[in-house]
Image: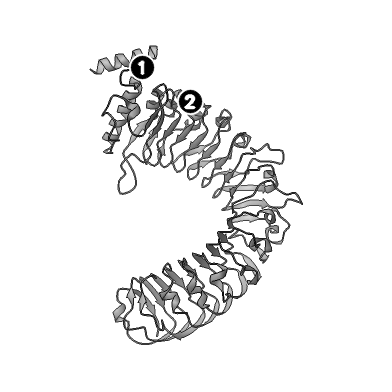
Amino acid sequence: MVTMLWVLCILQCMFHMPVAGGCNVEERIALMRIRSSLLEANSEVPASWGQSGDCCSWERVRCNNSKRVSDLNLYCQATVDAEGCSNWNLSLTIFSWFHELQLLDLSSNFACFQDFDGLQGVTKLRYLDLSDNSLTGNNIFESLGKLPSLEVINIHSSSMSGALQDSAFRNLKKLRKLHLGSNQLNGSIPPSLFELARLEYLDLSEFKKKGHIPITLSSNLSSSLQTLKLSANNLNGTFDFFWLRNCTMLKNIDLSRNADLAIDVKFWGYVPKFQLRKLMLSGCNLDTSIIAGPNFLGTQLHLQILDLSNNNLAGSLPDWIFRNEASLVYLDLANNSLVGSLNLMWQRQSNLQMVNISKNRFVGQLPTNISSVFPNLTVLDASYCCISRDLQPSLCNISRLAYMDLSNNKLTGEVPPGLFTNCSELKILKLSNNNLGGTILSGVRNLSFISAIYLASNNFEGALPNYLSGHLEIMDLHDNKLSGELDVYSGIFLHCKF
């Protein structure tokens, strides 16, 4: 029987003969071999595989009009153990049997794939996803460079090592998306990547890449470029945003955590053709004109995510951040040396969900109508600033607030009881190292929502209520003026000083 199948397979390959079941015999045999490899790895296999002779009807398989396999989706197919690994070892030579394959998805199997030369016969392959696996061999991109039809390559988080060869990408003229982040690649960035005319998405983040970014004023960057991610590397030299002036589709840039990378944001009166949605420049050698101006950021009217944290920036808050038409959702200015009043910040921002202005030198107070200013806020971190006066009861009306840290400020007065009882989403509240006072948890009986409260180093007095219901895990009350017994709270971590 096996011999007959091989005879049919050979005849079909020679004469392109269709088979009665409507499925290419050679490809059916290859799929059954993949099925066997999954069974050997103690993984489940698609239930329909092998149940009929027509592999085009099997789940995770799609065929073209010629009854040849065009799409093969084995995403998250292997069974993983408690450590998130699988025993699936597969030679990629098996896919050389699928001559008209255009899409191959093997992502999130945490498996070991090898023998990339086997892919060289799949010349029509357009989409390849091998992310979240373990890839072995040094010829990966040399092999992929021989597949000129490739448009999307995703090899994110796949334990690749070694250097990227510049020649490997010169033949990939149709490449639109390249996801290589979170691997162990080193060396420099290949200049040929920035010569790909159709490139839309480039992710080289979290490598050990060194050297400069191979872009210059004369570079002919793809006008289709939308996303550029080069974060968490060891890049140096200068990155000039003016280089990107003709990238009309640009939406997302992440250059964070490149401490030696000097970033120039000046455009010298030139208005860029792009409108960014996401800009992340945390932990870089950032041009100080990003605060003082002039720079291109004042022209970005649709910015949703802005991260300028950890840059030792000085000066006052720039007014372009809180323009009336701003659409900010995420703002991180933490760990800088920004100064001045916070009054500029208290303009209505209905889209803003996350604000981190901690570890700066701002002064001022929370507005009485803060729930109207930030109605959709989920995270507020204004710790280690110089915020003074009382906590506003309006905080209790921010229904989505989940995390608030106002510790290490100059807050006075009492804590509005509604923070403990009305904010159904609030899980962590940090108010330590202020000048807050009054009876501890006055009027509070039920802590059904909150899981951690930090009230240390304040002026709270009295005893805790006899019983507090809820699921509190941490209550830090040390360095206050408390009295009474705490035995009833033996299930909660309490750090108190009377």
Q: Position of residue 9 (x, y in %)?
A: 33, 16
Whether residue 383 is visible? no
- Name the kind of residue labelled 1 in the image: Pro
Q: Residue furthest left?
A: 1
Q: Which amino acid type corresponds to the residue marked 2 in the rendered image?
A: Lys
Determine the CA span between mark 2 and mark 1: 20 Å
Q: Quadrant of residue 221?
A: top right
210 and 295: which one is in front?
A: 295
Residues 388 and 28: in front is 28
In this image, 241 relative to 188: left or right? right
Q: Which residue is mark 2?
A: 124
Report the number of numbered marks.
2
**Considering the numbered disc 2 on the image, is that residue within a helix, a strand or a loop?**
loop
Residue 177, percent from left and from top: 54, 38
Is the residue 191 above or below the residue 252 in the image? above
Q: Is residue 130 above or below residue 379?
A: above
- Residue 191: x and y in percent read 62, 36
Quarter of the rendering occupied by the N terminus:
top left
Image disc number at residue 18? 1
How far from the left and from the top, in percent, is residue 168?
A: 55, 30
Q: Nearer the viewer, residue 187 or 7?
A: 7
Q: Quadrant of residue 297?
A: bottom right
Dot 1 lies on which element? loop
Tell whether label 1 touches label 2 (CB within 8 Å): no
Q: Is residue 185 visible?
A: yes
Label whose residue precedes the other's in the sequence (2 or 1): 1
